[in-house]
Image: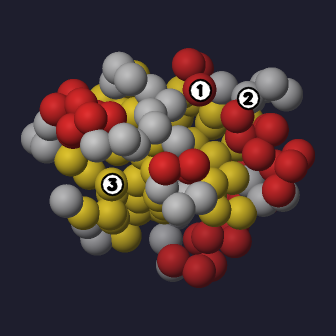
Amino acid sequence: MKVHHIGIAVESLHAGIPVFEKLIGCAPTSQEIVADQKVRVAVFQLGDSRIELLEATSPDSPIAKFIAKRGQGIHHLTLAVADLTGRLAELEASGVRLIDREPRVGVGKKRMAFLHPSSTAGVLVELVEEK
């Protein structure tokens, strides 16, 4: 298992990207829209991990709600797993509350699922499948 990425909620990619370009020293390696999650994403690759800036594409998106409640900042931590379906079943059996019982498709067309913060010390955790 490894840290896959940290998701950071921003009000605007237009404003957020230059900040992280200065911090990291490079431009985003990719940008895409994940329509299912109502989010526009800019990805900064950092060795084996990355930072994803997340901008809402709709006022009712989870990112828009997060920013309205907490402001910009770290939204979630993502861990890479080899078998997402199996790991979700293991976690649920051990009492971890799942947001997604079935994997969804996320950034880069990878299978992903979220765990509820009430079971993960208050941190929104995403699992992403990497074979």
Give the mark nearer the N terminus: 1 vs 2.
1
Please tell me which residue lies in front, 68 or 26.
68
**Mark nearer the N terminus (3 vs 1):** 1
Residue ID for mark 1 = 37
* Badge 1 element: helix
The outermost residue toward the right is 68
Residue plotted at (33% across, 54% down):
79
Residue 61 is tagged as 2
Q: Is residue 87 toward the left or the right of residue 112 in the image?
A: left
Judging depth in this view, the residue of 77 and 21 nearest the camera is 77
Q: Are marks 3 and 2 in contact (CB under 8 Å)?
A: no
Give the SS element for disc 3. Answer: strand
Near mark 1 (Cα within 10 A), the count class, few <14, some 14-19 or many ≥20, is: some
Secondary structure under tag 2 reads loop
Q: How is the image coloured?
A: secondary structure
Residue placed under numbered mark 3 in the picture: 79
Q: Is residue 60 above or below residue 55?
A: above
**Residue 104 appears in the picture as rendered:** yes
Q: Residue at x 77, y 45 (%)?
A: 66
The kind of residue tagged 1 is Gln
Image coords of residue 122 (percent x, y): 59, 58
Q: Are marks 1 and 2 in contact (CB under 8 Å)?
A: yes
Alpha-carbon neighbours of circle 2 within 10 Å: few (<14), some, or many (≥20)?
A: some
Q: Give the amino acid type for the residue marked by disc 3 in the picture.
A: Leu
55 or 82: which is nearer to us?
82
State the mark number for residue 131. Answer: none
Task: State the CA–CA distance, disc 1 to disc 2.
Answer: 7 Å
